[in-house]
Image: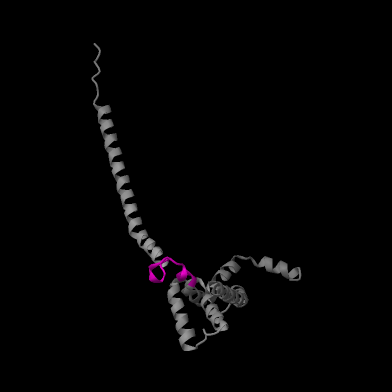
Amino acid sequence: MTARSVPSMAPAFERERRSVRITRRRLVDLASHAYIWFCLFVFVVPFLALLVYSFTGPGGTYAIENFQYVLGSFGENLFWSIRIAFLSLAIDLAIALPAAYAIVRYPFPGKRFLYSALALPLYVPGAVIGISLVLTFNFTYHLTTSVWGLVLAMTVGTFPLMLTPLIVALKDLPPVFEEAAECLGA
């Protein structure tokens, strides 16, 4: 005797589970899209209103006077910022490169403490460093009224940030290269 095969309920059950999964996936997709559109609406609409308001001139007419007022001296200010940054970079590099070389190549007491002290500005937020520089150089010494005062303030603020990567780079440089350079007359 042969056993008769009984139709299984498995395919119908699998189809039902698959349709439930598809429905859940569609609901999750719909909810995700609704959330994204809601966030876009909440965060972008105020900027659009601000953009429209920025083009509003006196008397409620549309004009670009506000942009001319804000961006009028932008080019000159950008030039001075770049000039101060490059001067500060040159001074930082001229001081930090020999200092990093001396710190890496020569033993002295307190070297580990110096490494720890140099790492401190990496843990402090930039705003805190900026405020402390303003308080020190502007209110205490009144140095930020000149270009060289700004260069000095920026140099002091960025010196540890320049010295730390130079120390790391020089630690990885084998002394063999320095000896070869000395033999070749450098």
Quarter of the image where the C terminus is located: bottom right
Q: Position of residue 78 (x, y in %)?
A: 55, 72
Q: How is the image coloured?
A: one colour
- The extreme top residue here reads 1
Count of numbered tags: 0
Quarter of the image where the N terminus is located: top left
Whether residue 2 is visible here, answered yes or no, is: yes
Any magenta on residue 65?
Answer: yes
> Which one is nearer the viewer's eye here, 63 or 31?
63
> Which one is nearer the viewer's eye here, 75 or 130?
75
Q: Position of residue 19 (x, y in %)?
A: 28, 35
Q: Position of residue 129 (x, y in %)?
A: 45, 77
Any magenta on residue 59?
Answer: yes
> Which one is nearer the viewer's eye here, 58 or 29?
58
Is residue 91 found left or right of 141 in the rendered image?
Answer: right
Is residue 114 found left or right of 22 in the rendered image?
Answer: right
Q: Which residues are magenta?
A: 55-68
